[in-house]
């Protein structure tokens, strides 16, 4: 009986220990996730955010060194932010040579682990100087490929468990998204600044218009008065001159009966005689004033033109097919243009959309962004297609990518998987990546819409519905 | 070429007059250096003294030798325990195989990361290059999140440089704690001692606390306060873990209980880093001593007895001395909360430390937060014993 109890007790103790171990592992992992996500959700400048992320990863994964490496122009990788890297090593690049762990992480888009980093020639010598025993390199991916590489290292021979590496890989992906979001925010901020300047100019234009209106009438009145003055000034001057000559003549006459009358007349005419000099000055003043009036008139005209320029421009119609041609011509040379099929749509009537220059640039930029990844990895016989069409009564640009399947990996390349995947009658729809948010916001602000749907049997169709031009027959 | 061994001498004084106390303790310490001049002087003292006069008294003996130190909540001097208000302890060291240099910063509140970088950088530059090194960090305990200070130091040092030390104390009043650099009293600041060494130096640390209750997630934290545990007011959850009804633990009684039941911050390797809640706020938050409790982290309420906490002394000394064979001195930083828990047995820890160290003199103080980075970036502890052998 005792033996049975003892065995039961041992079993219970073993189960208790196992449960406790599992509990600790679960807590450890949930702590890791909650702490990192807490930081990722904070709104802070990118540098500060990366710094906190690295410090937290260092703590959560008992890593003495945590470095985010960014590719430099010469192919090497330089520390962007670091924790635990002594400051005299912050400027030292890490080799990106083909046999390096950094290159392996970039190439395979998978973690690269050095189990014995201290004696591994593939690890840079200056990192080995830190006595690191084990290290892991993780690609930090964004929509346009590997954005950076994160390295975590321990100064002891305590290898990173595979589960830890998987968790780190997921976190490095989130870090890539944060970096991308920060970049998009910077772009958005810059666009907002530009918009603000434009608004200020518009306001200045309106102000100039109202000032011009207020100034114009009094200015015309002054101009007319000055013209009258200038026209009569010679006659006035001649009259005053004659009066002065008469007075001087009378003053010089020796007639005894004359002087009292002459003196009286002279006294009466004295102001007018002085006015002859004044009239001379008045002539110059009038000339100067007319010049000033002329200049003010110029200024007012400029104000009027400026205010007129800020009036909303008339919508400009643009053929969607031309927009596509512009975009294709503008594709980067390395994007595999032979893999692109462009339906010229020659038989179609003009499909016009409202396309002021800013919108046109946004659309072509967005198309480039959407086309480039597909073209870079297009397979022979499965080209990417772009065409113009009328959809839901509106001009539309449609990209069909038969190689694009909504697996997680593909979504990482083009779409932000944090966004919801929505089932629609035509297929699944995902929201657009953050990188294209800016262009998308501009387009949406003008009534454009973007959606995606899966192709049968494989692939993805991306549809941009554009604002129809009023002249476009529906 | 063989280098001269490190010589260490300690001295204490409980004299009433600050200058005389400093002079007497320093005199006793220097006398044990066999005529060699001190290259480094450490001063740990009760805050009751006129501190400038105390340092003047020390330097009247040690001259311009580099001096670092702090006010404490009890001192550890070669097996002797100086309790609250007891006096001053001085350690005098010859250079031996080391080069010492120090840098300090005042009024550093608000940017401790930068302050840590500055003092680490400046002290390193003065000490010069060496194959190995350690930084002994002393800081005002009331500066805020002291982990930021450690992080700043770590940014400069990297993992090969050991970081050890403690936050100054004021005998548990939490009003004014200061550190010393040469003859200066450093207000609201920190001092970093750079120890350039030809051999590796390692930090040893243990605490002796055991978890009780269940692990809980910190769901809201700000500054040095834990506001919520598991989505509920932190103080109420803390009471619940201790089997109390909400509100039972009044603000007045809080410290007496929390000192016996700190929080253990769960680490990835299954160990815990200790955080002591100093007080509870009217809003039901827990104010942590000197370290930011990270939101998203998991904590467990801990418990310990005088026996379990004292029981780690030998292990810490053993770890420290085995990392530095032939050491000339062992520097120890224990927590004021531990001494409070020891109560009448407070003198036992210094005695056990010295007994375990044998011939190697031990010296240190009771801090309000201990510094010891061993893995990762986290290097601040509460209610912990940490040591380094030189």
Image (tube, grey):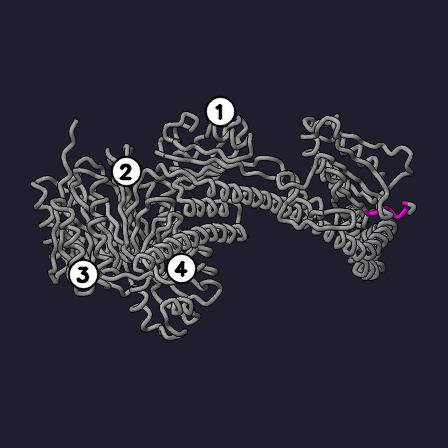
Q: Residue at x 15, y 59 (%)?
A: B347
Question: In the image, is residue A471 part of the stretch drawn in magenta?
Answer: yes
- Provide the residue designation for mark 2: B133
State the residue in front, B139 or A219: B139
Label 2 environment density (alpha carbons within 10 Å; few <14, some 14–19, many ≥20) = many
Residue reaching furthest front? A1
* Tag shown at residue B346: 3
**Could you classify mark 1 by the number of other residues whose Cα lies within 10 Å: few (under 14), some (14-19), or many (20 or more)?**
few
Identify the mark nearer the N-term, 4 or 2: 2
- B232 w.r.t. A21: above or below: below
Assess disc 3: are there few (<14), some (14-19) or many (≥20) residues with their C-alpha within 10 Å of its C-alpha: some
Q: Are marks 3 and 2 in contact (CB under 8 Å)?
A: no
Query: How far, Cα to Cα, is label 4 from label 2?
Result: 31 Å
Q: Which residue is mark 1?
A: A99
Q: CA distance from mark 3 to mark 1?
A: 59 Å
Q: Which mark is residue B224?
A: 4
Disc 1: host chain: A
Label 4 with label 2: CB-CB less than 8 Å: no
Closer-to-camera residue (A459/A63): A459
């Amino acid at each position: 009986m005792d033996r049975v109890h003892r065995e039961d007790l041992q079993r219970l103790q073993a189960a208790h220990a196992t449960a406790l171990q599992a509990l600790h592992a679960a807590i450890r992992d949930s702590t890791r996730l909650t702490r990192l996500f807490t930081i990722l959700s904070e709104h802070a400048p990118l540098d500060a955010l990366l710094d906190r992320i690295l410090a937290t990863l260092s703590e959560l994964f008992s890593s003495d060194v945590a470095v985010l490496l960014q590719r430099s122009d010469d192919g090497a990788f330089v520390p962007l932010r670091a924790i635990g890297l002594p400051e005299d090593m912050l400027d030292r690049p890490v080799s990106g040579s083909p046999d390096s762990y950094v290159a392996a992480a970039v190439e395979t888009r998978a973690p690269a682990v050095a189990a014995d980093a201290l004696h591994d020639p593939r690890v840079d010598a200056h990192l080995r100087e830190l006595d690191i025993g084990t290290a892991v390199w993780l690609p930090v991916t964004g929509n346009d490929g590997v954005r950076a590489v994160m390295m975590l290292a321990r100064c002891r021979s305590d290898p990173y468990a595979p589960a830890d590496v998987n968790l780190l890989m997921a976190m490095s992906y989130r870090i890539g998204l944060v970096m991308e979001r920060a970049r998009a925010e910077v772009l958005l901020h810059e666009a907002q600044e530009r918009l603000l300047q434009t608004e200020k100019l518009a306001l200045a234009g309106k102000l100039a218009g109202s000032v011009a209106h207020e100034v114009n009438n009094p200015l015309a009145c002054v101009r007319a008065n000055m013209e009258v003055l200038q026209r009569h000034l010679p006659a006035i001057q001649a009259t005053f001159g004659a009066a002065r000559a008469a007075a001087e003549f009378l003053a010089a006459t020796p007639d005894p009966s004359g002087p009292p009358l002459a003196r009286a007349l002279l006294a009466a005419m004295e102001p007018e005689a002085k006015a002859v000099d004044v009239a001379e000055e008045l002539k110059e003043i009038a000339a100067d004033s007319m010049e000033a009036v002329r200049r003010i008139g110029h200024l007012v005209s400029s104000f009027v033109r400026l205010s007129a320029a800020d009036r909303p421009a008339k919508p400009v119609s643009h053929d969607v097919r031309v927009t596509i041609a512009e975009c294709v011509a503008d594709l980067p040379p390395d994007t595999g243009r032979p893999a692109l099929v462009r339906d010229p749509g020659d038989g179609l009537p003009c499909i016009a959309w409202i396309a002021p220059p800013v919108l046109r640039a946004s659309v072509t930029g967005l198309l480039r962004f959407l086309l480039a990844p597909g073209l870079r990895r297009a397979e022979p016989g499965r080209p990417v297609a772009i065409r113009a069409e009328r959809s839901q009564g509106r001009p539309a640009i449609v990209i069909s990518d038969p190689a694009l399947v909504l697996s997680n990996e593909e979504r990482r390349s083009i779409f932000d998987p944090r966004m919801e995947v929505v089932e629609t009658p035509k297929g699944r729809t995902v929201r657009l990546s953050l990188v294209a948010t800016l262009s998308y916001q501009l387009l949406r602000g003008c009534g454009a819409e973007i959606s995606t749907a899966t192709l049968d049997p494989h692939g993805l169709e991306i549809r941009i519905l554009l604002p129809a031009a009023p002249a476009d027959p529906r | 070429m063989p280098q001269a061994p490190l010589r260490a001498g300690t001295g204490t004084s409980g004299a009433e007059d600050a200058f005389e106390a400093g002079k007497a303790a320093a005199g006793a310490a220097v006398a044990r250096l066999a005529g060699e001049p001190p290259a480094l002087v450490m001063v740990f003292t009760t805050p009751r003294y006129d501190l400038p006069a105390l340092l003047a008294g020390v330097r009247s003996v040690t001259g311009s030798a580099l001096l670092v130190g702090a006010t404490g909540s009890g001192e550890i001097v070669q097996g002797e325990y100086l309790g609250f208000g007891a006096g001053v302890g001085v350690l005098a060291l010859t250079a031996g195989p080391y080069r010492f240099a120090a840098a300090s910063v005042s009024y550093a509140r608000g940017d401790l990361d930068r302050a840590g970088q500055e003092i680490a950088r400046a002290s390193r530059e003065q000490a010069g290059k060496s194959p190995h090194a350690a930084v002994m960090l002393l800081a005002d305990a009331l500066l805020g999140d002291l982990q930021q200070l450690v992080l700043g130091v770590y940014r400069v040092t990297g993992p090969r440089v050991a970081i050890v030390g403690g936050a100054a104390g004021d005998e548990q009043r939490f009003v004014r704690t200061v550190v010393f650099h040469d003859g200066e009293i450093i207000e609201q600041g920190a001092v970093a001692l750079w120890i350039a060494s030809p051999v590796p130096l390692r930090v040893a640390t243990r605490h002796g606390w055991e978890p009780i209750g269940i692990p809980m997630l910190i769901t809201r934290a700000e500054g040095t306060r834990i506001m919520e545990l598991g989505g509920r007011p932190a103080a109420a959850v803390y009471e619940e873990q201790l089997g109390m009804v909400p509100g039972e633990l009044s603000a007045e009684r809080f410290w007496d209980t929390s000192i016996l039941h700190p929080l253990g911050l769960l680490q990835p390797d299954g160990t815990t880093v200790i955080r002591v809640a100093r007080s509870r706020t009217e809003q039901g938050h827990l104010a942590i001593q000197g370290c930011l409790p990270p939101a998203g982290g998991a904590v467990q309420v801990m418990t310990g007895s005088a026996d379990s906490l004292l029981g780690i002394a030998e292990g810490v000394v053993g770890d420290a001395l085995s990392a530095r064979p032939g050491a000339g001195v062992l520097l120890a930083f224990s927590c004021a909360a531990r001494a409070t828990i020891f109560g009448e047995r407070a003198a036992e820890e210094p005695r056990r430390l010295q007994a375990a160290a044998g011939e190697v003199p031990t010296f240190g103080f009771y801090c309000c937060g201990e510094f010891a980075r061993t893995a990762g970036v986290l290097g601040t502890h509460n209610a912990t014993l940490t040591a380094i052998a030189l």
